[in-house]
Image: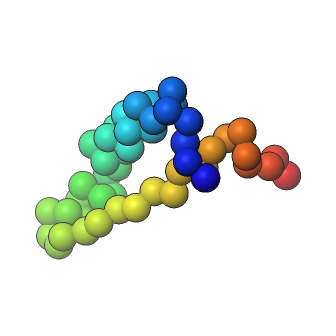
Amino acid sequence: TAIPPEDQERVHRCLKVFEDFCIVSASVRKGIDIDVEVDVVNPAESTAT
């Protein structure tokens, strides 16, 4: 389900921070090309267990 428009900018910011500070991805990227995908879940629709 789509992320509400008011949260989309925050999601993009979180992904950017993740890409900039993920130590493993940064280390691997130096040797090979990688593509990281993150599944974004709308918290209003997720269920806590």
Q: Look at 56% across and 36% down and name the residue there.
A: 4
Could you say which quadrant of the image residue 20 lies in? top left
In the rendered image, residue 46, in percent from the top left (x then y), is placed at 73, 48
- Nearest the camera: 10 or 36? 10
Q: Which residue extends farthest right? A: 49
Indicate left or right for 37 with 30 as reference: right
Query: Residue at 29% of width from left, 66% of height from top?
Result: 35
Identity of the residue furthest to the bottom in this view: 32
Q: Is residue 2 visible?
A: yes
Q: Is residue 23 above or below residue 14?
A: below
Q: Can residue 21 be seen in this view?
A: no
Number of disc labels:
0
Q: Position of residue 21 (x, y in %)?
A: 32, 42
Expressed as whole percent of the image width and height from the top left, the position of residue 28 reads 24, 65
Give the residue displayed 35% in from the left and 62% down from the top: 36
Answer with left or right where residue 10 lies relative to residue 29.
right
